[in-house]
Image: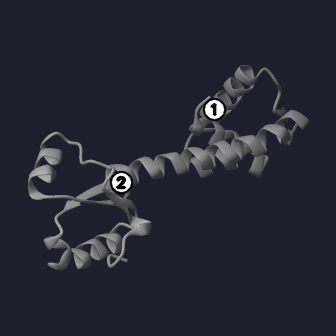
Amino acid sequence: MDLQTMRCFIAVAEHLHFRRAAAQLNMTQRTLSLRVRALEREAGVVLLERDRRSVRLTEAGRAFLEGARVAVRSGADAIARARGAARGETGRLRFGFTALSAYAGMPELVQRFRLARPSVHIELVQGDSSSLATGVLSDELESRSCIRRSQSQGFD
């Protein structure tokens, strides 16, 4: 049961007409009908009552419709989150700095980044140059000295 098949069912349920639903989805009526039938087989219930002149939702179809709408919205949200993460718009950034750099433009840099990527959680790690370099090279900055974004002072 995939999201596109659920979209097919939703379109038929909303239009109560296969031809109009197929036109909305830019597919043939036959393809749409086959997908809805396959969905009914997979679900093990009749979702739509059909005859030559009308289409009606069954009780099972009405129950399935709400769940299908939720699944499609959830799937679209998951896709959007994955795309945002791939573009670097979400996630976490651990930023290492020395005490001296805290006074040399870093607050403005952090603030500009937060404005550009508000969904990225920023963790600030203060340390000496040697420990920060070691942490970067090993891909692990120590989180014990981490100043969380919500607790950072002077960087908000």
Q: Nearer the viewer, residue 95 or 13?
A: 95
- Colour setting: one colour
**Residue at image x 14%, y 58%?**
128
Task: Estimate the x, y position of residue 6 in percent, counting from the top left.
Answer: 65, 38
* x, y percent for residue 35: 64, 30
Q: Amino acid at mark 2?
A: Arg
How far across and down, in percent of the image, does residue 103 sit?
A: 18, 79
Vertical arrangement, residue 55 with respect to residue 152, above or below: above
Judged by depth in the image, the label closer to the viewer, 1 or 2, is 2
Is any atom of residue 53 visible in this view?
Answer: no
Q: Residue at x 27, y 48 (%)?
A: 142
In screen coordinates, is 15 left or right of 152?
A: right
- Earlier along the polypeptide chain: callout 1 or callout 2? 1
Residue 24 position, x and y percent, is 61, 52
Position of the C terminus by quadrant: bottom left
**Would you name the residue on which mark 1 appears?**
30
14 or 52: nearer the viewer: 14
Residue in the image at 32% along x and 71% along y: 116
| Local SS, label 2 | strand
Closer to the camera in the image, 144 or 53: 144
In the rendered view, would you say 111 is above or below 12? below
Q: Is residue 4 visible?
A: yes
User: Separation of disc 1 and disc 2 at Cα?
Assistant: 47 Å
Q: What label does residue 149 carry, if any? A: none
**SS class, disc 1:** helix
Quadrant in the picture for the N terminus? top right
Say which of 35 and 128 sits in front: 128
104 vs 16, left or right, is left
Q: Residue at x 60, y 32 (%)?
A: 31
| Label 1 neighbour load within 10 Å: few <14, some 14-19, many 20+ | few
The numbered disc on residue 92 is 2
